[in-house]
Amino acid sequence: QAHLVESGGGLVQAGGSLRLACTLSSEFSPNAMGWYRQVPGKQRELVATITSGGAANALDSVKGRFTISRGNDKNTIYLQMSSLKPEDTAVYYCNTSPILMINGRAYWGQGTQVTVSE
């Protein structure tokens, strides 16, 4: 059964940087993976995606500040976040794209909290 683990979150001042990591434990390698984030009371939003070939895309509000990349193990992805802003505060999740489904339900890892103070 697939398993997602995110790490690297923390508390940082505005303008600072963090690097998130995610590992998908699975027998298959997805065509694409992505980072999502969610603020309490709001829907989860897609932040950035990367394909197995390395093609990347990102939300307009994070372009130029966030960089998604894949490890040598293509089931590992990273999100380098720079020039962080308080509005980047959220729980960050990774997942496959499209979302991983297990027994008919969307599967998510535990996420990692990113808090940006002013």
Image (cartoon, helix red, strand yellow):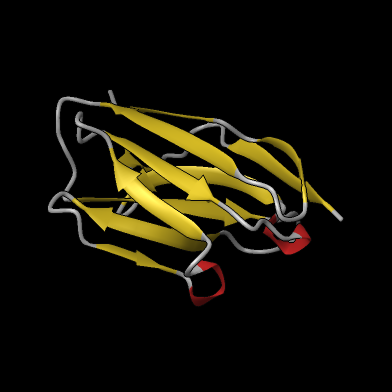
**Viewer-closest of 50 and 42:** 50
Residue sitting at x 53%, y 62%: 65
Image: 89 above or below 76: below
**Left or right, residue 71 beside residue 115:** left
Q: Residue at x 47, y 70 (%)?
A: 59
Residue 12 position by quadrant: top right
Query: Could you say where residue 5 lies in the image, as x and y percent from the top left?
Result: 45, 27
Q: Residue at x 69, y 63 (%)?
A: 42
Q: Is residue 14 above or below residue 6?
A: below
Quarter of the picture containing the C terminus is: bottom right
Residue 115: image x %, image y %? 75, 45
Instruction: Tell me which corner region of the image, top left, top right, bottom left or bottom right, holds residue 44.
Output: bottom right
Work out whether 72 lies above or below 95: above
Residue 30 appears anywhere in the view: yes
Instruction: Tell whether 66 sits left or right of 31.
Output: right
Q: Residue at x 36, y 29 (%)?
A: 23
Q: Position of residue 109 (x, y in %)?
A: 49, 33
Question: Residue 13, position in %: x, y?
Answer: 79, 47
Q: Residue furthest bottom?
A: 60
In the rendered image, the quadrant that contains the N terminus is: top left
Task: Tell whether 36 sits left or right of 105.
Answer: right
Residue 104 at least partly seen? no
Above or below 108: residue 40: below
Quadrant of res 87: bottom right
